[in-house]
Amino acid sequence: MKLDFMNTWLPFIYLYVGGGIFFLIGLIIIRKSKALDMRQKRHRFWWKALIFGYFYFMALHAFLIIAALYL
C-alpha cells in the first residue's frame, strides 16, 4: 500500500480537526455548566491534563506518521 496524503495525513486531519471540534465543544460545555471550578487546584490540574493530553497525542501521532513516511 502506498503511503500518500490520502492514507496518512488526511485521516490525521480528520481525527484531530473533526474530533478536536467535538473535544472543544465538550470543554465549553464543562466550563459553561460549571462542572469545573477553576478555583480548585485539582480541577485546574485536570483541565490542563485534558488539553495537554490532546496535543500530546496529536504530536505523537504526527511523529509516528513522519517516521513511517521518511525513516
Image (spheres, grey):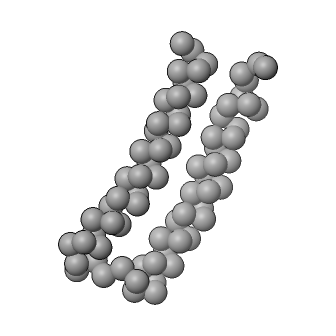
Dividing the picture into quadrants, the one containing residue 9 is top right
54 over 3 or under it: above or below: below
**Residue 54 placement (x, y as % from top left):** 46, 52
Quarter occupied by the N terminus: top right
User: Is 21 left, or right, of 63 in this rendering?
Assistant: right
Quarter occupied by the C terminus: top right
Name the residue at 22% across, 78% down: 40
Q: Residue furthest right?
A: 1
Q: Residue furthest top?
A: 71
Q: How many marks?
A: 0
14 over 67 or under it: above or below: below
Name the residue at 25% across, 72% down: 42
Name the residue at 49% across, 29% down: 63
User: Is 51 left, or right, of 6 in this rendering?
Assistant: left
User: Is 42 left, or right, of 25 in this rendering?
Assistant: left
**Residue 48 placement (x, y as % from top left):** 33, 61
Dividing the picture into quadrants, the one containing residue 36 is bottom left
User: Is 54 left, or right, of 11 in this rendering?
Assistant: left
